[in-house]
Image (cartoon, coloured by chain):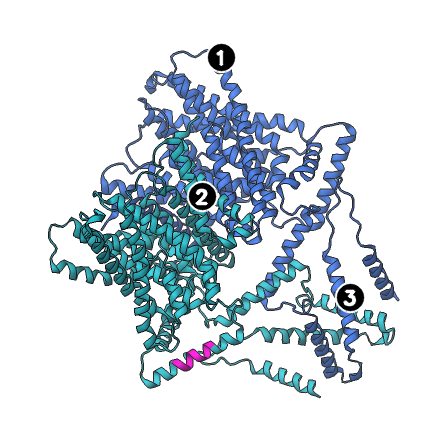
Chain colours: A blue, B cyan
Amino acid sequence: LDYQHVQVPFEITLWIMLASLAKIGFHLYNKLPSVVPESCLLIFVGLIMGGIIYGLNDRSPPVMDSDIFFLYLLPPIVLDAGYFMPSRPFFENIGTILLYAVVGTIWNVFGIGFSLYGICQVKSFRLQDVSLLHNLLFGSLIAAVDPVAVLAVFEEIHVNEKLHILVFGESLLNDAVTVVLYKLFRSFCEMPTIKSMDVFAGIGKFFVVGLGGVLVGLSFGFTAAFTTRFTKDIRVIEPLFVFLYSYLSYLTAEMFHLSGIVAIISCAMGMKRYVEANISLKSHTTVKYFMKMWSSVSDTLIFIFLGVSTIGENHEWNWPYICFTVIFCLVWRALGVLVLTFFVNRFHVNTITSKDQFIIAYGGLRGAICFSLVFLLPDFHRKKLFIAATTVVILFTVFVQGMTIRPLVDLLAVKRKRESAPTVGEQIHIRFLDHLLAGIEDISGHWGQYYWKDKLEYFNSKYLQKILLREYDQPKSSIVLLYEKLERKHAMELAQAGQLGHGLAHPSFLSSAFLCSSSDRTVITDQKLEDTPNPDVLDNMQEILARNLYRIRRTGPAYNRHTLPGDSEPAERAKELLILRHKSL
Amino acid sequence: LDYQHVQVPFEITLWIMLASLAKIGFHLYNKLPSVVPESCLLIFVGLIMGGIIYGLNDRSPPVMDSDIFFLYLLPPIVLDAGYFMPSRPFFENIGTILLYAVVGTIWNVFGIGFSLYGICQVKSFRLQDVSLLHNLLFGSLIAAVDPVAVLAVFEEIHVNEKLHILVFGESLLNDAVTVVLYKLFRSFCEMPTIKSMDVFAGIGKFFVVGLGGVLVGLSFGFTAAFTTRFTKDIRVIEPLFVFLYSYLSYLTAEMFHLSGIVAIISCAMGMKRYVEANISLKSHTTVKYFMKMWSSVSDTLIFIFLGVSTIGENHEWNWPYICFTVIFCLVWRALGVLVLTFFVNRFHVNTITSKDQFIIAYGGLRGAICFSLVFLLPDFHRKKLFIAATTVVILFTVFVQGMTIRPLVDLLAVKRKRESAPTVGEQIHIRFLDHLLAGIEDISGHWGQYYWKDKLEYFNSKYLQKILLREYDQPKSSIVLLYEKLERKHAMELAQAGQLGHGLAHPSFLSSAFLCSSSDRTVITDQKLEDTPNPDVLDNMQEILARNLYRIRRTGPAYNRHTLPGDSEPAERAKELLILRHKSL
């Protein structure tokens, strides 16, 4: 037996296997997932496993390595989130999201930090040795809402799209703020004196870290799109580029101390459109499927590890500090949401209702990111207290808030996500309104959302598409793409039901079907046997039939301000008119 | 800049990226891949990169780590090979393959080892310090044909299926022999004296290592199939199990010093059939695509690393030893193939032609496995000579043999692979003949290949399928499955061409098409406008038409000795007869 040799891959594979089997186990009983969120159950499994390991070895089980978390487990989840991000609601609410993510997070950090410092001043709590800076550092890691935890819960409760994107977008974009504040306070803790210069440098860093992440992500995303232009002869490695480039963007951003999460999201959102157009349908299925699979496994592993890492002797228990941490986390977030939403609502017609505000505040779940950050803290005498407080906050938010949010959503009758996809008619109208609003903004000289969207679309169709797309011709409108997708789906269903019409593809079959049906008519009506159409007539019929069917499908690209309507084969159109006229006779 | 932090994943990603970009580069010029095999070009790229690294750092570039090769790069390739192994030709030729793999490899090892020992006795070559055991050890690592190299070359030359499976099957199954002999000689080298017991124990090990690998692989394969029974509610992690279980089988086998390659191949071949039936179509596309992608990347990386590792100061040059190694590798393989084929041909009707024998002997390419094994050798004073000789043999076989085999195949007019897939008719006849031959063997009391195949099929349908398949009903014959696949493909083509017939699915559309075509008839013939069929007649027509089309698709499962023919709805059949009779009127 040579276990040493295979230990690393063997144990990794076993952990992944355990995670996958746990997932299967939960879904075997349909009742379970509908009551308890999967994340809670996974943490529970982790707790049990941690208890077993602790019992057997009599020492703390290994905690989740922060490096493993940030380098291997987090990227797949964020990539998945970015790639499947609904871009329309995201960009429509980008202002509000940024406000929550930047101002809201800063508000929470300082709020929690200062009020905990206040608690530390109470003599009977024996916490006077925790300095203000340490409290602020703790605040910076505990304030940030966690995308993994939010996604795990919000994917199951199906609230309306706007509410979902507000909470989820905030959880993703606050990474830049968290990174900056966490690193700032950590370096302040180690500095002997803090100059006001350092504080200003810290504020400047926000923009560098956030915008730098966006730039790194977009440049990798466009490179990825450009690369997939040349993969026509080796379709098999197409999916690889999507993963490689987005991972590289994450690693590069991390390397330069920029926000990796922001980078990978920009990369995924930037490349998606072009990559999808360049790669084959099967490659795309593989990309989508594998991304979902990978993020789902990462997610499972993170929650199991969270559970496992909770068990052990890393904790220092101090009732007041821990209880007040939980309370302040709740209170400051609620206050922040209230105040920020008040300002947001003053500038928007489509306001955020008080029910939505409650869910936004209540949905501020903490998760593995805080947990990894608290273990990354430099050693100091109260680190174990911080670990204990972080663990309690995570367990409280995931278990109590995560499990009660679904009943609350039901109770408050929060607007749910619409079940059906928008119809083609709706899509046409949305597009029409976009153009209209862009035109109005253009005339009124107001540089609003639609104006910029329109300019971006122009830039895209004029330059980007020509560089990044393999087969650049008239851009297909989303309606045509949707139609093609529906057509494919329909074809698959027909093939599965065994009702595929060979007729229209093979004219001979159609003619035989015709003959069959006309002979059949003779069976039933027993008359006019002589009117079986002759082959010439049949051929003509088929031709016109096929052309008509074809024309229906040739829906042109939707109206676009920047393209001229294509000339639609006048000869064909004339024929069609002729046929219609004859029909009406 | 914090490069340390992200170094490991960053460099891995960059290497994979380099490999993928190299692949794209080759395929940009269509001429290149048709003349030079990809493996040669990749080694060439590796040589250049190695040269650059050597020139910049002034020290040998890092060699390919044997652990990385055996634990991470080899398994995907072997898994891909096993999963897509054409099982029929493999099992039809299993005897010949095993003969080549076991007896042939032993023949080569001892032939090369003893004759190199003979060369070492020539005083002027200054090689007297290389002992017989060391020569045999060297023979054991240099004798084995490499599956990665063979696959890379044979996939491009498209020889006939039997020839391909003979060379490729041998390269896979000789792993068990190589593992045993290599470890045996290595331990002999370190032992003070060798008892005859040890030699017998070594012989016994063959069976343990080979059969043990098969057992480990099959048990993991069946567990995988069993697991996929329960993934109906979480389709997204289905592909994971295919990869996890096969990798675990490889690692487990390696852990117990069994043949990992044999294990992963048995696992893949064992699970494929059941997993495919259990998982969804999209999961299956993902599995197939990802496996191909992964193996293709591993393959590329291996050849690039081979090139990189060649550059450096690891080599001790000795002209006679290196030249004779190349010559003996060629001569002993040719002799071995000739002798073994002579015996094989005596027992088979379908003999191996002399052209095929030449290609089998000539296709014995060496590759990265030898290379990794020679670096794993314990340090002794002639290790660098062995490394040099191995490198030369690999480069000689990959470059000279790899590049000339395609012209030779053309020149000798070796039978090529048939381009088209077998027709349904052929498949039916093959199946019919199988049953017939199984019956004849049964009656004559001869326990041949067909007898065992039939028994296995019985066991499979009676027990295995019931345990391993989610929806166990009448087993679908391969013809029906093929038909469904063709149907799906056809549906996709129709949808893409925009010629999908909605008519047969939506009767209303068919009727409108009918009306249109009959009105169209009036356009052309300008007569009998009154004979537009009335709606009732149309409905009837459609019904009968749809039923007829449906019946064509309802091909029952092929005749099976172990199942009774199902009763095929006599009412329907009666109707059909009625229609046919009316038609003939």
At which x and y percent is residue A448? 70, 30
Marks 1 and 3 in Cβ contact (< 8 Å)? no
- Kindly indicate whether the residues beneath marks 1 and 2 are on one polypeptide chain: no
- Would you identify the image quadrant in which residue A504 lies? bottom right
Return the residue at label 3: A544
Q: Report the residue at 76% width, 38% height from top.
A: A436
Range of the magenta residues?
Answer: B430-437
At which x and y percent is residue A201? 50, 17
What separation in Å lies between label 3 and label 2 (alpha carbons)?
A: 57 Å
Please report whichever mark, 1 or 3, sits nearer to the chain's N-terminal start.
Answer: 1
Return the residue at label 2: B45
Q: Amino acid at mark 1?
A: Met
Number of marks in the rendered image: 3
What separation in Å lies between label 1 and label 2 (alpha carbons)?
A: 51 Å
Give the main secondary structure of the magenta stretch: helix
Asked whether residue A3 appears in the rendered view, the answer is yes
The chain letter for the residue carrying disc 3 is A
Marks 3 and 2 in Cβ contact (< 8 Å)? no
SS at badge 3: helix
SS at badge 2: helix
